[in-house]
Image: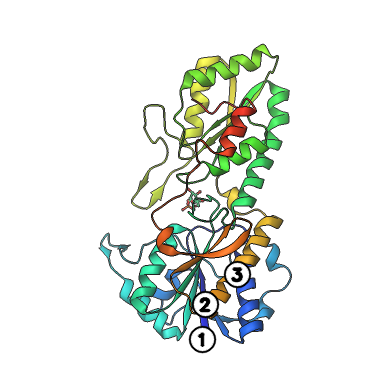
Amino acid sequence: IKRIGVLTSGGDCAGLNAIIRAVVQRAVDEYGWHVVGIHKGTAGLLSRPVEAETLDLSRFDGALLRRAGTVLGTTNKGDPFAFPMPDGRVVDRSDEIVEGLKELGIDALIGIGGDGSLAILERLCKQAGLPLIGIPKTIDNDVARTEVAVGYSTAVEVATDALDHLQPTAASHDRVMVLEVMGRDAGHIALSAGIAGGADIILIPEIPWDPDSLARKIEDLRRQDRNFALVVVAEAVRREDGDPVGRTREGGKVLYGGIGHYVGERLGEMTGAEVRVTVLGHVQRGGTPVARDRLIASIFGVHAVDLVAQGQDSMMVAWEGRSVTGVPLSQIIDQPHQVDPQGALVKAARGLGICLGD
Ligand code: F6P
């Protein structure tokens, strides 16, 4: 191995720069390799010349470890195997990406992404005959086999902080405050932030909800002289009739902010409470990375480089049982990790008297 490539793919999150820094540090210092940073994920590999730069440690002054986003840029538009062209056609552009990878003259690729991005990168690297090591990152924490993905802890912190901000104003105005959080098809952010932020009701896609149980919870609170309530709703929660309100993914367009408003309206109708709704949105992706994200990012970055040095391929670094390990990509692709309705967090939420909608 002489040269490795690194890219970030899919939605950004806090901690990506800390991963890139760790990869460069380990590859350059320990192995004496060159590291090529590919810009804008796979989109950079479609440009000619390929958009990339050699990364050395001077690029990573002390500030980058602390900064969210990714210095390399990223994209979550356009699966190269079914790429939407401006004229409406959908074409396979994987050959162009493979050519782009070859142009770089790299011996292995470290791909930083969620399970969707890692699945695409695996197909591309197989086609290019290039070893791939994946590093899981996503605020959604829905990657299988790893207890935590980079970016998740900061997103939970941001959402918890939002609840800390909402509680005093809820109490001052006798209001029900609904906070809609991200998470894609999983309720991890909602559940963790909801427990940490003292929510009264948490709705997650893994547990179907009944409006009557929400109304009963508000009544219970009133009987205890509680004049306000905090409600957290994960973006993938559907209406009680199964309609995915406000979350359409058509023609590449994604609309958010529907289900929080819907739940807020239902609560207002049923209880007569004054309700306000906050949709937290992309704020969750941009917070200053918390220490845990910086740590996991550093551990993953170093281990990914070591797996490349060992000649491994099609593996993802993972945090399991208080240690870092490598797991085959085949064990994480198409196996999104959702909240376990029987798991410890759900049990804790119920133990705290939090209404989970059922
Ligand atoms: O996967 C990360 C995530 O932030 C999800 O929580 C959210 O559903 C989605 O990406 C938002 O994507 P976009 O940035 O394309 O709106």
* 233 w.r.t. 95: above or below: above
Q: Which residue is mark 1?
A: 1
Q: Secondary structure at mark 3?
A: helix
Q: Earlier in the sequence, mark 3 or mark 1?
A: 1
Give the vertical position of 282 relative to 137 (above or below): above
At label 2, counting other C-alpha atoms closer than 10 Å, the crowd grade (few under 14, some 14-19, many 20 or more) is many
Q: Which residue is mark 3?
A: 301
- For label 3, count other residues whose C-alpha is less than 10 Å away and answer few (under 14), some (14-19) or many (20+): many
203 vs 351, nearest the viewer:
351
Q: Is residue 5 above or below residue 323?
A: below
Q: Secondary structure at mark 1?
A: loop
Q: Amino acid at mark 3?
A: Gly
Label 2 SS:
helix
Sequence-wise, the earlier of marks 2 and 3 is 3
Q: Front-most of 337 and 140? A: 337
Say which residue label 2 marks. Answer: 308
Q: How many circles with numbers are drawn on the protein?
A: 3
